[in-house]
Image: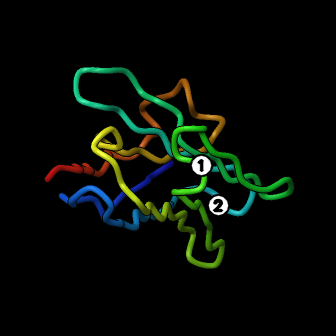
Amino acid sequence: EVHLVESGGGMVQPGGSLRLSCAASGFTFSNYDMTWVRQPPGKGPEWVSRTVNITGTYYAESVKDRFTIARDNAKSTVYLQMNSLKPEDTGLYFCFRSIDYDHRENWGQGTLVTVSS
């Protein structure tokens, strides 16, 4: 059974930083691309970043040069380092295997990021 647990969210002022973690279990982590999305209050999910084992990392234009995705296959964990945070980065951040984009039951519970002064 796929199990993902996000952590590291919180409230931060604009310009601040947070590091999100997503601990995975129930599957062979190193075999899968991983994705982060966020869901702003009252809106649908918005794709943020993806790590692909062979070809690298990808980012939404809105977070490029501010966010960095990384993975530790030995710890079955994917990270999202978020710098220079803006109020529009506020939302519930989820991680999942990229193949599970349309299978919400395989997402984690999310971690809330609030950027506000």
Outermost residue, bottom side: 74
> Residue 59 vs residue 86: left or right?
right
* Residue at (62, 73) in percent of width and height: 72
Residue 102 spot, x, y in % from top left: 54, 24
Residue 84 location, quadrant: bottom left
Q: Position of residue 68 (x, y in %)?
A: 57, 61
Indicate the secondary structure of the residue bearing disc 1: loop
Of marks 1 and 2, the one in the foreground:
1
Q: Position of residue 78 (x, y in %)?
A: 54, 63
Q: Which residue is mark 1?
A: 64
Q: Is residue 1 visible?
A: no
Please, is residue 21 above or below residue 60 in the view? Answer: below
Q: Residue at x 21, y 59 (%)?
A: 13
Q: Position of residue 83 (x, y in %)?
A: 43, 63
Q: Which mark is residue 48?
A: none
Comparing 62 with 22, the one in front is 62
**Residue drawn at (59%, 38%), measured in percent from left and top?**
60
Image-based side of 110 in relation to 115, left or right: right
Q: Earlier in the sequence, mark 1 or mark 2?
A: 2
Residue ID for mark 2: 29
Report the Cα–Cα distance between label 1 and label 2. 25 Å
Identify which residue is drawn at 30% across, 41% down: 92
Q: Is residue 42 left or right of residue 4?
A: left
Q: Is residue 114 left or right of residue 43?
A: left
Looking at the picture, which amino acid does disc 1 mark?
Answer: Lys
Give the structural element (helix, strand or loop) at label 2. Answer: helix
Q: Residue furthest right?
A: 54
Pointer 2: residues within 10 angstroms few (<14), some, or many (20+)? many
Task: Find out whether the residues at labels 1 and 2 contact each other: C-beta distance under 8 Å.
Answer: no
Amino acid found under the numbered disc labelled 2: Phe
* Residue 97 sits above or below residue 81 on the image: above
Residue 78 showing in the rendered view: yes
